[in-house]
Image (cartoon, rainbow, N blue to C red):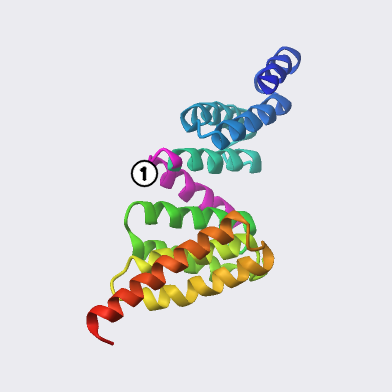
Amino acid sequence: ALLREAIGGLRQLHGEQHPHTLAAMGNLNGVLAAQGKFEAAEQIEWRVLDFRRETLGEDHPHTLVSKYNLANRLYARANYDEAELLLQGVWKTRSSRDGQSHPESLKCLAMLGSVAKAQGDYEEAERLYRDVLAFNDELPEDHRFILRCKANLASAISRQSGRDSEAEQLLSEVYDGMRQTLGDEHGDTRKAKENLSKLRALLLEDERKTGR
């Protein structure tokens, strides 16, 4: 409520398209998304994007941020084709202007991997996640983003027939890295532990069935 009031005040003071107003709308968008109100967040992000396109241009950094944020909202609502189209445009601009290894470029590429995985294209998802890890030369191996990317890579691999052992090894590395950097009680660490336990249970079941 306070944030909406602040946006109303900024609109009266500066106008709808002023950077301060758009920044506040972006903050509200983030709050709504955190509350799971993805449709409302998507509507706001479309407005912010339209204003930034009009006032800043298609390839301005703030416009690219809005496109990426909107793609996230679309992904959350399973609008994968629209999300992919936006992300491909952001990746093209980011990678050519800032370089493939720039953290913002890597974020976009990883999100494309998540879209591919959500659509069931696990080979493409694997390729994209591997590209993120290959292009990265700025973030340390134990960075949270890199660990999450490895976890997603393991997930994409595990969904391809006969590759559970490969996925288990990678996910084990992720779990150890998260324990060291985030701690045992962090949500990401717990999720990695849970996924690793499930994968190991599947491997044990396969061994039991095959008699190995």
Q: In the displayed structure, does residue 62 sit left or right of residue 45?
A: right
Magenta stretch contains residue 55: no
Quadrant of the drawing holding the C terminus: bottom left
Q: In the displayed structure, does residue 51 sit left or right of residue 87?
A: right
Q: Residue furthest left?
A: 210
Image coordinates for residue 147, horizontal then vertical, percent? 58, 65
Q: Which residue lies furthest to the top in this view?
A: 12
Question: Residue 143 appears in which quarter of the rendering?
Answer: bottom right
Magenta stretch contains residue 78: yes
Image coordinates for residue 146, horizontal then vertical, percent? 59, 64
Question: Which residue is more in the foreground, 138 or 152?
Answer: 152
Image coordinates for residue 93, horizontal then vertical, percent? 55, 51
Question: Residue 50 appears in which quarter of the rendering?
Answer: top right
- Residue at 59%, 72% (x, y): give it: 176
Question: Which residue is more in the foreground, 197 or 13?
Answer: 197
Q: Give the range drawn in magenta.
A: 76-97
Image coordinates for residue 44, horizontal then vertical, percent? 55, 27
